[in-house]
Amino acid sequence: MRKKQKNKAKTLSISRGTIIFIAIIVVAAGGGIYYLLNTSTPVNEKYPVFATPSHIYIVGVHDPTQGYVYEQESTRQARKAVSGGVADAAIHIPRGTLVALHFINEDKDTGASMDLNIDNFNVHTSKLNYFQAQTVTFLADKEGTYSYYSNLHPEMKGSITVDP
C-alpha cells in the first residue's frame, strides 16, 4: 500500500522548471494584453476601440515664401499635397472614424522642431526634429470643424472637419 502512495505522489508533482515556464507564459500573455489595450485606446477615449483606422499623414515643411506649413496626404482620401508649400491642409473625415494621424517633420531647410495639436480631440505631439515622426490615434466623435496648429510656429495651421 505504501508503494501505491509513493508512486501517486511522484505522478502528481510538478517540476520547478514547469512552474517557471508557466509563470513566464502568464507574464508574457499579461504584458501582451496590457500592450494591446494601451495601443488600442485612442487619446480621447477611456476604452479601447478595435477598428481599422483611417491613416492621415501630415507633413511639416518650411517653404521659403510661406514659412512653416503643414502639407497633408491621406491614403483614405487619395489626396496628396502639391509640393512646394502649396498645400490643402483641410482634412474631412466621417463622424465615428478611428483616425491614425501620422505627423512627420520634413523641414530639411532650417532643421527646426515642429509639433501638431488638435485640442478638441486631445491630440498633442512631441517636439519633433528633422525627419522624426509620431503617430497619434483618436476617435473623431464630434461633428464640426476644428483647427490644428503648432505651438512652436504660429503660422502652421490647418483644419479638420468631421462630417455627419
Image: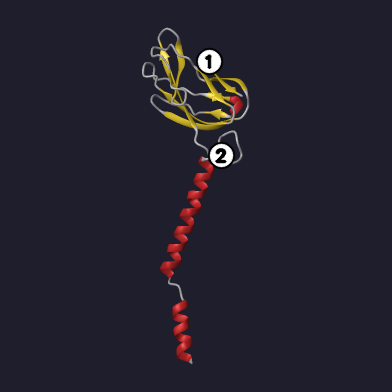
The tag on residue 49 is 2
Question: Dot 1 lies on which element?
Answer: loop
**Residue labelled with disc 1:** 154
**Is residue 92 left or right of 10 when viewed as pictured?**
right
Which quadrant of the figure has residue 49?
Answer: top right
Counting from the top left corner in percent of width and height, residue 123 is at: 55, 28
Label 2 and label 1: CA atoms lie apart by: 33 Å
- Please tell me in which quadrant of the rendered image residue 108 appears: top left
Q: Quadrant of the C terminus?
A: top right
Mark 1 residue type: Pro
Q: Residues within 10 Å of mark 2 (few under 14, many from 20)?
A: some
As drawn, the residue found furthest toward the left would be 108
Name the kind of residue labelled 2 in the image. Answer: Val
Q: Callout 2: helix, strand or loop?
A: loop
- In the rendered structure, which disc, 2 or 1, sits on the residue that comes first in sequence? 2
Q: Residue at x 63, y 27 (%)?
A: 142
**In the picture, residue 62 is in which quadrant?**
top left
Residue 95, position as x, y percentages in the image = 59, 27
